[in-house]
Amino acid sequence: MRLFSKALAAGGEEVFGTFSALAVDAGYGKYLQTHTPGWRRIIADLSATLLATLEPGAPPEPIRPDEEFAEGSAGDLGQLAVAELKEHGLAFSHCLGLVKLLRAAFLTVVETAGGERALVSALARFFDKFELGLGGEWHRLELSHCLRELRAARHYILYEKRRYYTIFHRMIEPAFVVDSRSRLCDVNRSFEVFFGVEGRDIIGKRCCEVLHNSLCTVPQLDASLRDQNPFANVELTLPVVGGERTVLLSGTYLGDLEGEFPMSIVVLQDVTDKKRTEQALRESELKYRSLIENMPDVTWRADEGGHLLFISPNVRKVCGYSPEEMYPLGRFEQIHPEDLPAVQAAHGALFARQERFDVRYRLRRRDGTWIWLHDRAGAVIERDGLRYADGVFADVTELKGVEDELERHRSGLEELVAARTIELQESNELLRREIVERRQVEEELRLLTVSLARSNEELEQFAHVVSHDLREPLLLIVAFSERLLHRCGRGLDDKGMEYLQRVLRSARRLQQLVDELLQLSRISTRGMSIEILDLRQVVGEVVEGLEERISQVQGEVEIGVLHAIEGDRVLVRQLFQNVIANALKYRRDDVAPRVVVEGRLVNGDFVEVTVTDNGIGFDEKYLDRIFIPFERLECSGKYEGTGIGLATCEKIVIHHGGIITARSKPGEGTTFVIRLPVRHWGAAGKGGC
């Protein structure tokens, strides 16, 4: 007993040594090395408790087998040991094995010290209580922990259920829960709206009965239920309210809910608009790429340091380099040294102050030649922490050559312009003099015109006076010649009769000439009485007045469609009387004269009247002569006349603001064309056709 107490009094070092040896043999050496302090404390507590049962200084007394050693202390030590052991996460099976080794170590020390049988038995009962206390405390702690975990799990499950229902029914995307037989177990509100159905009416039905058959044949959905694996982004086109929509299906296995049957949840994401947008973006990108690749200029993207992020493929045409060769070179590698500082300064100003990048510089092509580029960029873009600019450059070598050529010729052009300016000044001076001279000539012409008008007026007055003064003597000559012919004609011989008749004819012809001159002079001097004239009525009156002459020549006059105009009735009647009388007079032998008068509107402002006959006609090269007074193309004396009738017609037409002309061929008749304004425009000369 004394040797055993001595072994315990040293803090159980002898026991710990034996325990360590046993633990190493049993395979617990590595664990014991990691948790040595804890086991030392346990052995020290056990040793102290065992020593407390011995009386200090008293010889050891034999222990009876039924004696309880330190009643209750062994169980308490077991509970304390649990706290020490669980602190290091030791499993109960390992802990119990080590406690068994600890019992063996104590028993070994007792037996080595020559312990009595009663002491060994009591020590065994002590460790029974120690193990019982340790096991009970361990079980209590584990049970308490399990109960806490169970309560937490139940609370978590309840919380998750509530969260599931909250999330499921408030989801924006349509979603449904389906079992292994593709039967709908639950749908959310978004599903009902999306497919236009009521959830209570479709629960328990198969997917293909409610939705499209393609939804029930998704292999990923079957695999999710069979293999308990999630799936995502399965694209389908489904019929919905208002047409078809493209959706992406994603789902996951929910497990055996409430121990009944396996289920999966499926969420539908409507990507119809996204697909359309992606398609539009693809088309837009295709157009943009086609534009970039086919435009003659080169587009580029570069960062603040001048590193190329993108350059279009047509850089090969402009610079000779492929895009892959340009990326390592950067923006400034091949620029002419003289132009490089300006380009770098403009590039820096673009990124520093948002100043527009617009420069021209020389760049070395891949073949070593130099070309001129016009490079432009507008703004700096910042995205994802990267600042860059998009720009475009074009080959302006030819343009630069033209500009240089223009610059070389500019001085010459300036000299030429100066010389031309002097010449222009001289020309202007000459023109100014010509203008002064022209004004002088115009003033002379104006004075001459006034004088001529005065002379014409005096001439008309003279013609009127002369014709008026000649009329009376002619009347007397004709009258007395006729009386002489009647009274003395029988007493005259043939020669005297011939002389008298010739005097009478000449007097009558002179009388007619005087009358026609008087009419011609009166056209300009008399005032015009303007009224609306029915030309068909006026021409009808003229034909009626010429009825005797028409009957004598066995002719006819046909009047067609004629329109109304504004004019002087007397003058217009005299106009058509002279023209129709001319047509009857200049007839062909053995051909009855036929005259056709008809008209038409021209542009709504003029009436064109044509008087066509089948007479002798004339050569149109003499057209300018037929309207000159006293001019006669037929001089044989066969046709009587003075040559004033057509001149009178022209004056009447001009006085009304119109024109008169004729078309004719010898032997084929003549057509006089008279164009008169529908409305009177004032004095002669203001009209015209």
Image (cartoon, helix red, strand yellow):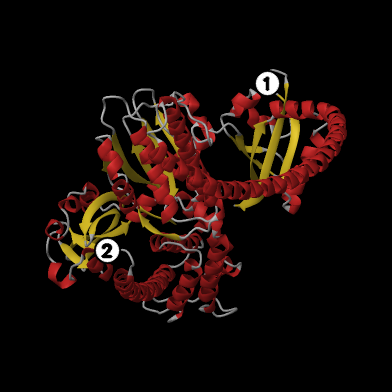
> Callout 2: 10 Å neighbours few (<14), some, many (20+)?
many
Residue tagged 1: 366
Q: Which is in the foreground here, disc 2 or disc 1? A: 1
Q: Position of residue 480 (x, y in %)?
A: 46, 44
Q: Which residue extends farthest front?
A: 491
Secondary structure of the residue carrying tag 1 is loop
Q: Position of residue 339 (x, y in %)?
A: 80, 33
Q: Is residue 196 left or right of residue 339?
A: left
Secondary structure of the residue carrying tag 2 is strand
Image height of 187 relative to 232, above or below: below
How far apart are labels 2 and 1 at the CA level?
A: 61 Å
Q: Position of residue 505 (x, y in %)?
A: 44, 35
Instruction: Determine the image quadrant of residue 444.
Output: top right
Q: Which residue extends farthest top?
A: 367
Q: Nearer the viewer, residue 436 or 208?
A: 436
Q: Is residue 451 left or right of residue 17?
A: right
Q: Say whether residue 645 is visible.
A: no
Instruction: Determine the image quadrant of residue 365.
Output: top right
Residue tagged 2: 175
Q: Position of residue 29 (x, y in %)?
A: 50, 52
Q: Is residue 538 left or right of residue 76?
A: left
